[in-house]
Image: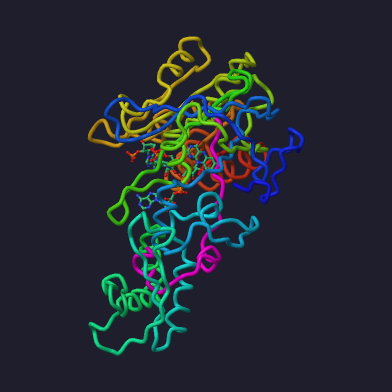
Amino acid sequence: MPLLELGINRGDTLADWSAKNPYDSTVTENYVLNGEGSRKETRHVVFDLGDSGLEYKAGDALGVIPITSAQLVEDVLVALGANSDEIVDTHAGEMTLKEALSGYYEIHQANRKFVTSIGQKFESSGGSTEIRIVKRTRTSVASGQATIQWAWSGDEDDYPEGYNMMESGGDTAQELWKTLASDDKEMENYLWGRDYIDVLNDFGHLGFSAQEFVDQIDRLKPRLYSIASSPDFQPGTVHLTVGIVRYEGQGRAKTGLTTGYLADRVPEGTENVRVFMSPTRSFVLPEDGEKDMIMVGPGTGIAPFRAFIQQRKMDKAKGRNWLFFGDWTEAGEFLYREEINDFVKDGTIDKLDLAWSREGPEKVYVQHLMASHGAEIWDWIDKGGYFYVCGDKNYMAKDVHSTLINICAEYGGYSEEDAKTFVEQTLMKEEKRYLRDVY
Ligand SMILES: Cc1cc2nc3c(=O)[nH]c(=O)nc-3n(C[C@H](O)[C@H](O)[C@H](O)COP(=O)(O)OP(=O)(O)OC[C@H]3O[C@@H](n4cnc5c(N)ncnc54)[C@H](O)[C@@H]3O)c2cc1C
Ligand SMILES: NC(=O)c1ccc[n+]([C@@H]2O[C@H](COP(=O)([O-])OP(=O)(O)OC[C@H]3O[C@@H](n4cnc5c(N)ncnc54)[C@H](OP(=O)(O)O)[C@@H]3O)[C@@H](O)[C@H]2O)c1
């Protein structure tokens, strides 16, 4: 892969590792944290920092640059009817189409721009339609393709010899495209869970050149992961807690790009896994080790709190540590159970509250446990304690936020409006004691 074309220079100084100049790390550990029978796949992945000189602090994130599965690349090449060796011009310079699709573009998730651009094909085709014939067998990828010009007579069964009308789509494809282009919701639903194999199955007969294709699809973006280790407790390594995204779309098993990469293509011992540090300025430990900390981190939200707790132990910080963790079940999803229990035993964790959402008839969430300990949470905050949240941004963090406001109103003696100002203005912005790492 022409990394140099990304601006990567192996001679750069150690401190220069970045998204454009990632460090080739070795994955030394990669295992599932869930208990037997769990329907979740949450992995603990350890990266060796070797002699990179990379440094980090608890609270920072690691950027991972994934590589797309070779199978998906092959299948998209076939669906596109393109030659893998064809040279394309990309944001990272000229390279073969195969290289581009493997490491520089997101082909596992179709985008709006590409689907919208398909309209030009219908407009420009007039009465004649260019059909790119694609043989859908793997062996024919390199040579088995041709582009033909063909004028439709108007008869339904008029199509070139050897061409399967089912694949050509014809009117159906145009109707589908019109619906998508005119209705945002339809477009959103169509794109959800569809990759370019799916889209090219619907529209590939219109014929897309390799260059046209890469010009419209999304560039590959690195993904960030909250670091789950303290550099003092786990020297020379970075630990991540990764929730693997797996789902079925259009009848095929699919994965998120980076979580699929980490789960399926990076076994222990894999070298050249490209990473870089993404330091945080805000999601940091209290400078004063005597300050108390309340940490709310269900699911993969536990990651930075494992790092914080390890760091507080190394620092021999005197402040108290209170952890709220939760997930589906204690047996299946109590991530880092032994470590957490050990930290409770040795006194590093002073208080531990666990919310299991799928054990009984009622959902128990972290904010329910917060509410039942409202007086004590207020007491910690009133005495200068810090409040941290990590994990799901869309639901959990919002509910935890309003629960915190309610606690401050009820036990701090504020009106509802003043409690909101206290939490959002005083705690968050002025005193920076309410810190969030949500995604
Ligand atoms: C600061 C920060 C810290 C983070 N820390 C962590 C962490 O510690 N651990 C962690 O696991 N993640 C963390 N994340 C999230 C992480 O960066 C990735 O977003 C996540 O791992 C998914 O990446 P992916 O490449 O595997 O998925 P993507 O390829 O980005 O795919 C996700 C997309 O897949 C599609 N999709 C998902 N489910 C379905 C479905 N059922 N049907 C159809 N389509 C679906 C959706 O379009 C979704 O947006 C963090 C994010 C940020 C910003
Ligand atoms: N799940 C995955 O496979 C996966 C993979 C990668 C990333 N992600 C994303 O990464 C984040 C963390 O994912 P995760 O799987 O570790 O954990 P998660 O989906 O956030 O679930 C952790 C716990 O939070 C509970 N929860 C759901 N809604 C809640 C709410 N409103 N308030 C409080 N708790 C709530 C869940 O319960 P219930 O589910 O029982 O309601 C579960 O017990 C989320 O943004 C998620 O979308 C998820």
Q: Position of residue 170 (x, y in %)?
A: 32, 78
Q: Give how far across and how far down residue 318 sits, in percent.
A: 62, 15
- State the colouring used for the structure image: rainbow
The picture places residue 38, in percent across and down from the top left corner, at 30, 31
Q: How many marks?
A: 0
Q: Observer-nearest residue: 209 or 346? A: 209
Depth check, front residue: 359 or 209: 209
Residue located 70% across and 28% down the image: 53
Residue 75 appears left or right of 239 = left
Where residue 94 sits, quadrant-wise, is: bottom right
Q: In screen coordinates, is 189 left or right of 294?
A: left
Q: Residue at the far top: name it.
A: 346
Q: Nearer the viewer, residue 407 or 4?
A: 4
Residue 140 can be seen in this image: yes
Residue 375: in magenta span: no
Q: Residue at 56% across / 25% down in the picture?
A: 229
Tell me where residue 415 appears, x and y as whole percent: 52, 44
Which residues lie in the magenta part? 199-227
Residue at 33% across, 86% down = 152
Residue at image location 40% in from the left, 43% down from the top: 245
- The extreme front residue here reads 143
Residue 207 on the magenta segment: yes
Left-right relation of 250 to 97: left
**Is residue 294 visible from the viewing direction of this image?**
no
